[in-house]
């Protein structure tokens, strides 16, 4: 790990979000602003629980899923002299390395292993969710380049929250991370993995389904504002479409929009600019013909999109509602009930049954695309 990432301090954790929690508690001072380029749900809440204020710093380049090497170099050159730590969510850094290899002529002949090492050189630390690039079922990583103080403080918290500093609380069977890390750096593997996402996107585009372009490296994102323009964002169109995809195709996908973003301090939905459904593709599982079956099912939904209405919450937890919330489809057309705000659901009471409804289970949680049999 030290050789691959070029970092001196490597701390295993049982999940990526555990690494986020420890990093946030060690690095963030109460009242501190934490700028980032596009939020991730658990990252945001861990930073806020540590007393920080998450700030999305989004520029036009953020709409491209690839972080260029020049951008990495320039950000680090600006922050390093000012004592501002640059910390990566390196969960999909290998996929980013492949996109640099593909797009940047200077790196066409450079191996993925070397590109990854150069990426990490432009930061001070990282977290990793091992279920992605590492090709393992569970596990995570917290790493620091050269700051022994951060590493010692993190080790203390790791012992409290996770277990031993050598295994992060993981059983021996899940410490196969070393093998997965080696395989993730195989140029042939990562090329096949990323290009399958592009293949699926092409099939959806052929059917007229609106997707975000350029295609990402691990998933295809459906633009739900264009797919269901008749459904108001406070009726959670992406969540409803994710549920419909499950019912139509038997695969589970993920909402990334108003439900995931949550509510502000006044209880109002954030209504983010992006209302998306993410089709995340597992590694080494499905053939392109299986991807075609998924695309065909979504195309059928697109043909009858006008009949798809919104959702309302019947149970909404105070945090991470996309994991545990329960929703119900509106029974009547929007015009029959007016265009007022969605009624606020009741909150969960201590001891109340929290079993999930089929609609929540269809799209709640960051689960991979999988078949009915899977």
Image (cartoon, rainbow, N blue to C red):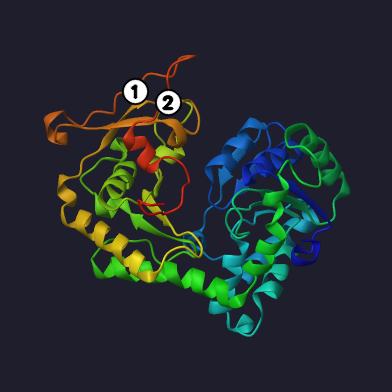
In front: label 1 or label 2: 1
Q: Residue at x 34, y 69 (%)?
A: 289
Q: Residue at x 54, y 78 (%)?
A: 102
Q: Residue at x 44, y 31 (%)?
A: 324
Q: Which residue is disc 1 drawn over? A: 344
Image disc number at residue 101: none
| Viewer-proximal residue among 203 and 283 | 283
Vertical comparison of 167 with 181: above or below: above
Q: How many marks?
A: 2
**What is the secondary structure assignment of the residue under circle 2?**
loop
Percent position (x, y) of residue 10? 79, 53
Q: Residue at x 34, y 23 (%)?
A: 344
| Viewer-proximal residue among 339 and 144 | 144
Percent position (x, y) of residue 59? 51, 58
Q: Quadrant of the N terminus?
A: bottom right
Left or right, 197 with respect to 223, comes to right
Q: Which residue is disc 2 drawn over? A: 267
**What is the secondary structure assignment of the residue under circle 1?**
loop
Discs 1, 2 touching: Cβ within 8 Å: yes
N-terminal of the two: label 1 or label 2? 2
Binning the other alpha carbons within 10 Å of mark 1 as few (below 14), some (14 to 19) or many (20 upward) gives few
Q: Quadrant of residue 215?
A: bottom left
Binning the other alpha carbons within 10 Å of mark 2 as few (below 14), some (14 to 19) or many (20 upward) gives few
Q: Quadrant of residue 47?
A: top right
Rounded to the nearest whole Å, what is the CA distance between mark 1 and mark 2?
A: 9 Å
Look at the image and tell me whether residue 363 can be seen.
yes
Left or right, 289 with respect to 55, comes to left
Percent position (x, y) of residue 209? 26, 61
């Amino acid at each position: 790990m030290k050789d691959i990432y070029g970092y001196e301090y490597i701390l295993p954790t049982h999940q990526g979000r555990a690494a986020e929690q420890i990093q946030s508690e060690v690095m963030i001072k109460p009242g501190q602003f934490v700028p980032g380029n596009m939020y991730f749900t658990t990252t945001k809440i861990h930073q806020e629980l540590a007393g920080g204020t998450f700030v999305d710093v989004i520029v036009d380049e953020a709409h491209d899923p690839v972080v260029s090497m020049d951008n990495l170099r320039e950000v680090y050159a600006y922050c390093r002299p000012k004592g501002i730590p640059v910390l990566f969510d390196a969960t999909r850094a290998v996929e980013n390395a492949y996109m640099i290899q593909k797009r940047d002529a200077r790196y066409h002949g450079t191996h993925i292993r070397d590109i990854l090492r150069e990426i990490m050189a432009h930061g001070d630390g990282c977290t990793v969710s091992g279920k992605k690039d590492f090709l393992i079922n569970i596990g995570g990583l917290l790493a620091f380049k050269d700051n022994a103080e951060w590493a010692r403080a993190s080790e203390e918290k790791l012992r409290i929250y996770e277990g031993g500093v050598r295994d992060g609380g993981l059983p021996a069977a899940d410490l196969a991370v070393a093998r997965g890390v080696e395989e993730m750096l195989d140029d042939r593997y990562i090329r096949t993995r990323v290009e399958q996402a592009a293949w699926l996107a092409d099939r959806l585009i052929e059917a007229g389904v609106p997707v975000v372009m350029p295609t990402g490296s691990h998933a295809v994102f459906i633009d739900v504002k264009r797919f269901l323009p008749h459904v108001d964002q406070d009726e959670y169109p992406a969540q409803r479409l994710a549920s419909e995809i499950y019912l139509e195709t038997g695969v589970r996908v993920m909402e990334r929009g108003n439900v995931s973003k949550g509510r502000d301090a006044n209880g109002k939905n954030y209504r983010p600019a992006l209302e998306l459904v993410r089709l995340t593709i597992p590694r080494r599982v499905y053939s392109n013909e299986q991807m075609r079956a998924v695309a065909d099912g979504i195309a059928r939904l697109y043909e009858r999109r006008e009949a798809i209405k919104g959702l309302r919450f019947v149970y909404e937890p105070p945090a991470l509602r996309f994991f545990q919330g329960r929703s119900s489809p509106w029974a009547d057309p929007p015009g029959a009930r007016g265009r007022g705000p969605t009624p606020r659901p009741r909150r969960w009471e201590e001891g109340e049954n929290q079993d999930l409804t089929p609609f929540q289970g269809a799209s709640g949680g960051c689960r991979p695309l999988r078949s009915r049999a899977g």
